[in-house]
Amino acid sequence: MLARVAETLYWMARYMERAENMARLINVNANLILDIPKKTVLGWEPLIDITGTRENYEEKYHSFEERQVMKYLISDADSPVSIANSLKWARENARTVRDVIPREAWEQINGLNHYAKDQLNVAMSKRGRFSYLNEIILRSQTIVGLLSGTVNRDQGYLFIRMGRNLERADMTSRIIDVRSANLLTEESMELRPFENIQWMSVLKSLTAYQMYRQAMQARIRRADVVKFLFQSQRFPRSILFCVQQMERCVQELPDFENSLRRIHQAKRLIQGAELHAYDQGMLHDFIDHIQIELNNIHEALNDQYFLSGRIYGQEQEQKQAS
């Protein structure tokens, strides 16, 4: 497989995952604002911090009013994290590898990009935003299912999985970091009755609420939510699960040693964390370390597979040997 094709599939999956995550995050934040007492100031600013693009945002926008944040996260063509921009690049990457992915997958990705652009006026209205974002989520999940059910389990599919899981792990870590710092604090006795709403919103941002209740069989508590989202080996959006998926994928590629070493470093860090003992400052530092390790995984994949020219599979290696 050409390194260019591998990189294109990897980024196609990352951009698709990014668009779906952003749509879900906006919807959940809107519901949270309605559920929390008016005297509690939450607003939309935390979403900018979750994306890690505050500096970029402040170059163009001068407040964190709802409409401006929505424009930046949904429709702004210059925003590196907007739904419109993510889907544009997912579509562009898919277009260049149309001969590698099923035609139906290309048609769905292309159709989703057109829908996202054509319905931007609806998306920017409070009345239409929820249905617009829900459509983005459902169509994105359809594409993930279509790729899962129709693509050969070859090297191309491995890079799709690795891109999706790396993006997932990164977003999960960002949501936990910003939400745990900027929402209600455990020390606020006045707002203690709403603590479960805070952590429920974190779970719902990751479509994790029902799976958490099934796995933990306990009421929603900060320590349990953090443990579940970091260390669950069964929930597909937990950081450990995503890292283990990448571990399995990379071992099916040639010359995987450096990438696997980076993955193992992240895995050991997650598994060894005594999360129940972390206060907010310790949790923030831990998440910073996790994000560095995730970036190291990306850099290792980039150096080994995307810049090296060509990735040979078993068939090509056998032909060369003969």
Image: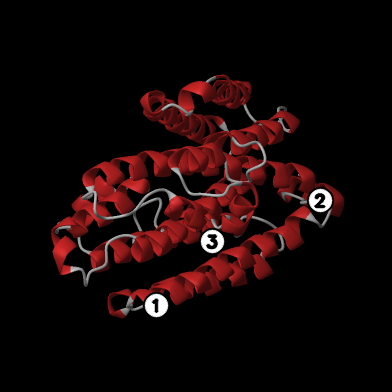
Residue type, label 3: Glu
Left or right for 111, reference 41: right
Q: Which residue is mark 2?
A: 310
**In the rendered image of this protein, does residue 177 appear above or below residue 206?**
below
Q: Secondary structure at mark 2?
A: loop
Q: Residue 56's spot in the image, x, y percent?
A: 63, 53
Q: Which residue is mark 1?
A: 281
Residue type, label 1: Gly
Report the quarter where the N terminus lies. top right
Left or right for 272, reference 307: left
Q: Which residue is mark 3?
A: 247
Query: Closer to us: mark 1 or mark 3?
Result: 1
Mark pair 1, 2: CA separation: 44 Å
Query: Closer to us: mark 1 or mark 2?
Result: 1
Q: Residue 250's spot in the image, x, y percent?
A: 61, 58
Name the one closer to the observer, 38 or 221: 38
Question: Could you say which quadrant of the image residue 307 lies in?
Answer: bottom right
Q: Residue at x 47, y 30 (%)?
A: 136
Q: Secondary structure at mark 1?
A: helix
First in residue order: circle 1 vs circle 2: 1
**In the rendered image of this protein, does residue 298 appear above or below residue 282?**
above
